Image (cartoon, rainbow, N blue to C red):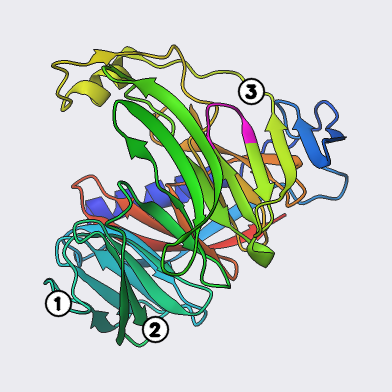
């Protein structure tokens, strides 16, 4: 009972923190056209237009698996248009499906090597075609099911050295990180067809060469949005690119920022399980400008920075409207997973290491 009361108090505290939006007008936003692309230059502090809602308020509505642990290794989740929640358990190699009220109604998949079976799933998405797409890293394939759970097809990723975080659009095309690690680390972001045939390269960047290694190496972060636009960035700079589905640059969002220094504790945490023999660790002085980005259901771009509250666990997020203007700075209780129809769905971990799904009602004021 004491633990539940403590969790409740923590939830109330987080809800209060999320209500804090730092939106006092700062320097003016500068918008220019450079080489045919609209570039939005944002200052360090939010600068919303008059009348813009800049305070985010969250209230917890539902928790799945918090009171009694339901998952062995909950790694990802997805939500369909009916509000049903799809929880991906890596250890059990299955998907548990819950109603919008949190009632378990069915499971999808099982461990194995046959059609519709999973070996080491790590990510799940509901595609615009309303299919379930699971990235099975161990089997090196994408596995597709209907919403009801019938197996549809496998798509092999074996010809791609690395294949991470696929995002499907309305045509069935896929944006994915297909980086190459050899003597030189080549960060690559590509647009692929439904069978993972190459369509075009969004960006390729050469990073450190072996034996040099940066434990904080940057990775592409990206999402697909309305009209299949591609919102992406490589966080070596505070820049966010917005491209058309055909690969035409439409808009670039730039923001001024104060670097966050890397601490000795962070270095220790990064290297405690790292085999360092034969490599030369290159420590940057500061973190990248940001960690990753995601979208809410109204097209706002949330960018998680490396700035934290004093507890060291809760991160600040910069919020941009769909035009690229910096409108607010908020804190969120954890990494966001899905934002749909005014609800924010997250995976959160308690003090004992058990993970559960939480659902928050969101509103802007």
Quarter of the image for residue 283 reads top left
Q: Nearer the viewer, mark 2 or mark 1?
A: 1
Quarter of the image for residue 149 reads bottom left
Q: Which mark is residue 114?
A: 1
Residue 79, image x and y in percent? 44, 72
First in residue order: circle 3 vs circle 1 = 1
**What residue is rendered at 65% in x and 42% in y?**
241
Q: Nearer the viewer, mark 3 or mark 1?
A: 1
Residue 59 in sight from this viewpoint: yes
First in residue order: circle 2 vs circle 3 = 2
Side of 211 where 31 appears, left or right: right
Tally the numbered discs.
3
Q: CA distance from mark 2 to mark 1?
A: 20 Å
- Based on the picture, tell me whether residue 235 belongs to the magenta stretch: yes
Dot 2 crowding, Cα within 10 Å, few <14, some 14–19, many 20+: some
Discs 2, 1 touching: Cβ within 8 Å = no
Q: CA distance from mark 3 to mark 1?
A: 50 Å
From the viewer's side, name the closer residue of 1 and 38.
38
| Quarter of the figure with the N terminus | bottom left
From the viewer's side, name the closer residue of 192 and 54.
192
**What residue is rendered at 47% in x and 78% in y?**
83
Indicate the secondary structure of the residue bearing disc 2: loop
Dot 3 crowding, Cα within 10 Å, few <14, some 14–19, many 20+: some
Discs 3, 1 touching: Cβ within 8 Å = no
Q: Which mark is residue 257?
A: 3
- Based on the picture, tell me whether residue 8 belongs to the magenta stretch: no
First in residue order: circle 2 vs circle 1 = 1
User: Magenta residues, as a range?
Assistant: 234-239
Indicate the secondary structure of the residue bearing disc 3: loop
- Disc 2 target residue: 147
């Amino acid at each position: 009972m004491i633990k539940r009361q403590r969790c409740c108090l923590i939830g109330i505290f987080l809800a209060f923190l999320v209500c804090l939006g730092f939106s006092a007008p700062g320097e003016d936003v500068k918008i220019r056209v450079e080489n045919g692309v609209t570039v939005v230059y944002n200052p360090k502090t939010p600068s919303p237009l008059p009348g813009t809602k800049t305070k985010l308020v969250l209230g917890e509505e539902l928790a799945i698996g918090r009171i009694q642990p339901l998952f062995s290794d909950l790694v990802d989740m997805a939500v369909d248009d009916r509000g049903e929640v799809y929880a991906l358990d890596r250890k059990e190699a299955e998907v548990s499906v819950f109603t919008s009220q949190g009632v378990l109604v069915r499971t999808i998949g099982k461990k194995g090597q046959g059609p519709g079976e999973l070996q080491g799933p790590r990510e799940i998405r509901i595609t615009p075609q309303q299919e379930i797409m699971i990235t099975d890293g161990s089997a090196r394939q994408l596995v597709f099911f209907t919403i009801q759970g019938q197996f549809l097809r496998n798509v092999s990723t074996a010809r791609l050295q690395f294949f991470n975080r696929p995002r499907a659009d309305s045509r069935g095309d896929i944006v994915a990180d297909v980086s190459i690690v050899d003597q030189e680390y080549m960060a690559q972001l590509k647009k692929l067809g439904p069978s993972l045939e190459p369509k075009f390269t969004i960006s390729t960047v050469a990073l450190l060469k072996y034996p040099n290694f940066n434990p904080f190496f940057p990775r592409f972060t990206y999402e697909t949005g309305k009209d299949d636009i591609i919102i992406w960035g490589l966080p070596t700079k505070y820049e966010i690119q917005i491209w058309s589905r055909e690969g035409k640059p439409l808009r670039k969002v730039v923001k001024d920022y104060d670097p966050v220094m890397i601490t000795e504790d962070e270095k220790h945490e990064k290297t405690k399980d790292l085999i360092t023999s034969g490599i030369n660790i290159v420590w940057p002085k500061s973190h990248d400008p940001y960690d990753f980005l995601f979208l809410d259901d109204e097209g706002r771009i949330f960018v998680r920075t490396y700035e934290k509250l004093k507890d060291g666990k809760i991160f600040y997020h910069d919020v941009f409207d769909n035009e690229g203007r910096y409108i607010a700075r908020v804190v969120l209780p954890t990494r966001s997973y899905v934002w749909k129809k005014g609800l924010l769905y997250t995976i959160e971990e308690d003090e004992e290491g058990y993970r559960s799904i939480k659902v928050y009602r969101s509103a802007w004021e």
